[in-house]
Image (cartoon, helix red, strand yellow):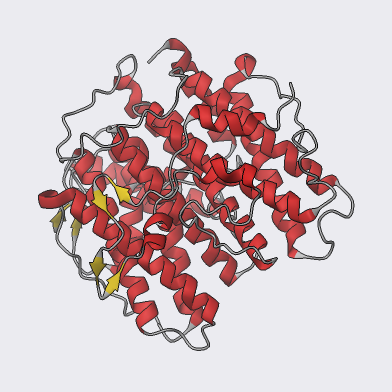
Amino acid sequence: MNLLNIFEQIEKADPEFNERINPRRAAIKNMAGFGTKVAMSALPLALGSLFQKAYGQTQPTDVNAILNFALTLEYLEAEFYTMGVATPGLIPAGTPDVAALTQIRDDENHHVAFLKSVLGTIAVAKPTFDFTAKGSFNPFSNYDVFLALAQAFEDTGVRAYKGQAPNLVGNKTVLGAALNIHSVEARHASHLRQMRRARGANQKPWITGKDPGGLPAAAQPIYNGEELDTQATVKITGIVANGVTISQSAATEAFDEPLAYGDVLTIAKLFITG
Amino acid sequence: MTKNAASTENKILVEQEKGVLSLSRRKFLNYATAASGIVLVAAGCKKDDNSILSEGVDLGSGDVGILNYAYALEQLEAAFYIQVIATPYANITADEKALLTDIRDHEIAHREFFKAALSSSAITSLEVDFSSIDFTKRESVLGTAKAFEDLGVSAYNGAGPLITSKDYLTLAGKIVSVEARHAAFIRDLINPGSFVGSDVIDMNGMEISKSPSMVLSVAGKYIKTKINASNLPS
């Protein structure tokens, strides 16, 4: 009997055990992989030639640089919500919006704290943000603008983490952590899109084509590329099954697309002054 | 892996440990039971604790195994939403029906994508068992939808780090965030504002992953076909 069998046994008695112990367990299993880069095995499927696109011009390859990139985005989100929640009269009092935005604020601050702790002394300092983007927006005096920027940040965050995930292949712990933040950003995005929908924005919790959902034209780069409807050479639009024909809208909604490092930075830099 | 990366990894482990809750007393008692079980197994020294998972349809190994695992879950979700839309629950609103139809189509798209991509490596069509679901009742349907969506997100997150191909990982990433959008939407339908909750995220604000064995033990209730996940990477 080896150590992993013991984990299996405990898991049976305590289904949540794995959730708590998984980091260490992963570390134990990863030990053998330390110092080696996981080899790309010959692809068993005829999908090898996919994703010829190079996601990123100056893409960092160092894990810590990727985490600092993530930290920069989390700083931006955390400060944005912290300021928004603290601005008197911005969020309609007595509505569920207060709790929702407070929850998101807390999640983003937790992400910042997590990444800062992980990076320690090599963590980048928090930039100085200008959420008006040099006077283009007034998020802290106009609630709809605030929600629009929030959605923009969340949808960008989802694409940014997705874009970096492949660069973490073989590093189970870091990749696992990145994925666990990625899906939370997607939950936030879904809720913010619903909040804006309830206020009249013609959009859904998922992204249809490259539709910016009523966001200003400056936000279009956040959605460009989301209109892809062929995945790994499989054309999704027009698939017929169970009496359903998959529409182009559904085909694009069903898959979120990654965004390159450089493209994410271009968007983020609109709000960074130093 | 560089020395830097290894040190980063260790710090992530430490921070994640801080983010988890301490054991409750009930859990401790369960541990005691598990511990005695371990002694017995050790004494018998027979490694058959995966028996539940080692018979039935074989998902396969490596990246193909992970893709078949995802394909199995998408089959389950697609079959569920097809039924939801075929027999809508009482007093469903037009808006709910429209968005649940969207989700049905997304899940069919995911399922058919995996089927096509896996080609001859794809597992067979699974037989589902929805006898525990009352499709006429909103509460039953949405409660099941929530369970499936949250499970799907935790499953993709748990399986992602096991994938060795960047292309496959990207594909899984493209799907998991859509499942998370579904999950948040369904949760908000049940209880507005519950798009994230302490049942799905830890104290670091990070989603809680689930291993294939944990996921299949939950999903198994709804799948008649036996699934063999014993060859999946871990």
Indicate whether B157 appears above or below A239. Answer: above
Q: Quadrant of the N terminus of chain A?
A: top left
Tell me which corner region of the image, top left, top right, bottom left or bottom right, holds residue A100.
bottom right
Q: Quadrant of the C terminus of chain A?
A: top right
Q: As drawn, is B163 to the left or to the right of A266?
A: left
- Where residue B177 sits: x, y (%)? 46, 49
Occupied quadrant, residue A171: top left
Residue found at the far top of this picture: B3
Question: Which residue sits furthest left?
Answer: B120
Pick whichever, A13 or B159, lies toward us.
B159
Query: Is residue A21 among what the camera can see?
Result: yes
Q: Residue sitting at 74 percent across and 35 percent down?
A: A133
Residue A89, compared with residue B86, is above or below; it is above
Horizontal side of residue A49 vs A10, given as left or right: left
Tell me which residue sits at (66%, 49%) in the image: A216
Relative to A52, is A100 above or below?
below
- In this rendering, the count of numbered labels is 0
Residue B20 visible in the displayed image: no
The residue positioned 30% from the left and 21% from the top of the image is A33
The location of residue A161, given as percent across then percent down, is: 49, 36
Where is residue A70? Give x, y as percent. Answer: 56, 30
- Name the residue at the right extreme: A88
Residue A156 in the image, given as x and y percentages of width and height: 56, 41
